[in-house]
Amino acid sequence: MKLHPPTHGTYVGHDVVDSENHEVGTVSDVIYDDDGNRPAWLVVDLGLLHGARYVPVAHSYTADNGNIVVPYDKHQVKGAIKPPRNHVLTAEDVERLITHYELHDTRNVARPRAHDGRHGIRDVLQVGAHDERHDTGEFGGA
């Protein structure tokens, strides 16, 4: 099986599975770093009873079948904070997520800009949408 770093075109609407291929949820949104160049956080819908949660892009990959594979099982993802309607991350949210997911290398973790305490760049993507400026094949994880 080939492992491919995720790109913009392989996120929204695709299933998210853990490393054992167990279903986690479906990507509904992508939060980019402050430069708007790299996806940093996925908003993953876990189903009707559980809502959505943030999942870091770091250490994920796209399998040949299109699934986004993350190193977290559904139980761990359920324990992450729920995004607000606008999916904007605060500095406090990012710190809580870093702790929750035990992200030791945070160089590729998007952090909100200090001037307003909110994440500066956020793209809401529709299922099947495609924006060439983000489909660079670059990946800041793994």
Image (tube, helix red, strand yellow):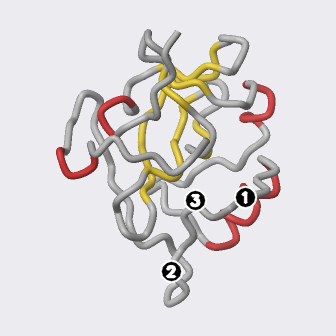
Visible in this render: residue 47? no
* Rendering quarter of residue 11: top left
Residue drawn at (68%, 62%) of the image = 106
Visible in this render: residue 64? yes
Up-down: is 112 above or below 94? below
Pointer 3: what residue? Answer: 108
Secondary structure of the residue carrying tag 1 is loop
Q: How many marks do you count on the picture?
A: 3
Label disc, if present, on residue 113 of the rendered structure = 2
Q: Do the residues bearing badges 3 and 1 touch, measured as CB atoms within 8 Å? A: yes
Q: Earlier in the sequence, mark 3 or mark 2?
A: 3
Q: Quadrant of the C terminus?
A: top right
Q: Do the residues bearing badges 3 and 2 touch, measured as CB atoms within 8 Å? A: no
Secondary structure of the residue carrying tag 3 is loop
Up-down: is 78 above or below 118? above
Residue drawn at (54%, 34%) of the image = 44
Pointer 1: what residue? Answer: 105
Q: Nearer the viewer, residue 51 or 68?
A: 68
Judge left or right: residue 123 versus residue 82: left
Q: For mark 2, does the 10 Å Cα neighbourhood hold few (<14), some (14 to 19), or many (20 or more) residues?
A: some
Residue drawn at (64%, 47%) of the image = 82
Q: For mark 1, does the 10 Å Cα neighbourhood hold few (<14), some (14 to 19), or many (20 or more) residues?
A: few
Query: Which numbered mark, 3 or 2, is in the foreground of this view?
Result: 3
Cα separation between marks 1 and 2: 19 Å
Please identify the residue farthest to the front as the structure is shown: 2
Q: Amino acid at mark 3?
A: Asn
Q: Amino acid at mark 2?
A: Arg
Up-down: is 104 above or below 62? below
